[in-house]
Image (tube, helix red, strand yellow):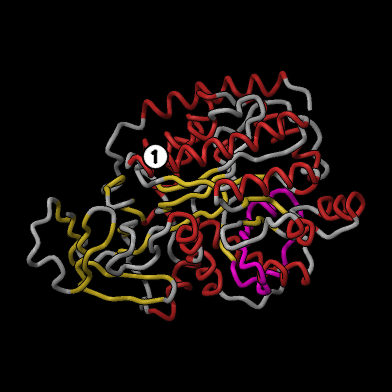
Amino acid sequence: MILIKNATALEFDPPRIRTNMNILIDGSTIKAVGPDAGADANPGKVIDAAGRLVYPGIVCSHHHYYSGLARGIMAHIGPTPDFMSILKNLWWRLDRAIDAPSLRASALVCNLDAIRAGTTAVIDHHASPNFIDGSLDVLKQAFEQVGIRGASCYEVSDRCGRQDMLAGVQENIRFAKSLDAEKAAGTSAGLFESHIGGHAPCTLPDEGLEAISDAMKSTGRGLHLHVGEDAYDVSHSHVTYSEDIAPRLDRFGLLGPRSILVHAVHLSSAEAELINERDTFLVHNARSNMNNHVGYNTRLPEYKNLALGSDGMGGDMFTELKHAFFKHKDAGGPWWPGDFLKALAAGNRILERNFGGKYGLLEPGYAADIVIAEYDPPTPLLPENIAGHFAFGMDASITRTVLVHGKLVYEEGQFPFDTAEIYAETRVQAAKLWERVDKLAP
């Protein structure tokens, strides 16, 4: 057992603050919360929060861990005048250059970055056309090594041909069934789950969507797919299939409560309504949309299930929420910080739909994914203004201690292992990766 005492317990949705609280953790879940919680227990470790903030771990609901070694990339990228050029000249060369060592290094540093920012769960979306079989195992091992919760899937696409497309489907199926086998055998660490992934409708012919649909049925997993990120995706759907994107996906049974759609910058109100009817989640990625100049999603308030992700821009969701809010206000949107904090907290509902269990509150029976943070508010911190402090006062640097699944993975600014060796290896792998990128034609 672990006892956190003298905590200022803070929750995001619904917003709540309770002072002088004890939180007793037993195994992977919270056992008791209250001023005297744990008084009769004999915990193996006691953490005195000394009045600091203690809140549920943050969720990044869409990420690309294969992008972790792209920071400062020194390779000849070529012209990127539009979104498809960005994909072809940068990202589709980078992911083709990924091998097992570079993927492992990339995933490890992404996990370290996330934990330092108080992000305890990440929903990843992976692609590596020259390393498909077994790639999801490498990601899972990196998550478990750091101790962070997450999920991933292989990004099925026909951009490297039909055989690669079908190989991606098989990797999703193989990996999902391997997770099921671990659970059945009682050997699962309980930290990792999966979706059935796809790149985007414009790179998925009907055969690909049908294969994905069959994979979802055979594994019981949901879809994870970019949709309408750029106007090209919509135009392609109209020209090739004479159909809007969401109805096309629905025709194959791909929308549902366990499915995640990403971006939807250019989808219509009718498509938003259909997505709502199917109880599907939409994940908004403000920084990525701005970076790729794909436009702004003015329909965010129309979605009933909205979460926040980074689309490969990192695991710092403080920064992501700020960009989401400020871009929304710049576009004349009606939402306030509280609306975006609610969307950030909604990532816990994605976890519940995929992992089972309860997430996002400091209550008995909820997952012990917990952050202890050092924030001395210059103005009163109240339930009604938590979001205002999040957007205008707090940042990732307030993170001090992190627990995931009831285990300490970061304590007083330190990991329980030496990170120097990891960073040394990532620099080596990054240089090799960049060299391989330079050798690949778009």
> Residue placed at 45% from the left, 23% from the top?
425
In this rendering, would 440 be left or right of 112? right
In this rendering, would 263 be left or right of 67? right
> Residue placed at 48% from the left, 33% from the top?
137
Amino acid at dot 1: Glu
Q: Is residue 304 magenta?
A: yes
Q: Residue furthest bottom?
A: 384
Vertical comparison of 10 with 87: above or below: below
Measured from the top left, where is residue 123 in percent x and y?
52, 49
Vertical comparison of 9 with 79: above or below: below
- Estimate how packed mark 1 is, as few (under 14), some (14 to 19) or many (20 or more) residues with alpha carbons within 10 Å: few
Measured from the top left, where is residue 90 in percent x and y?
72, 34
What residue range appears in magenta? Answer: 277-305
Vertical comparison of 370 with 199: above or below: below
Q: Which residue is mark 1?
A: 182
Q: Is residue 387 magenta?
A: no
Measured from the top left, where is residue 360 in percent x and y?
40, 65
Q: Is residue 313 visible?
A: no
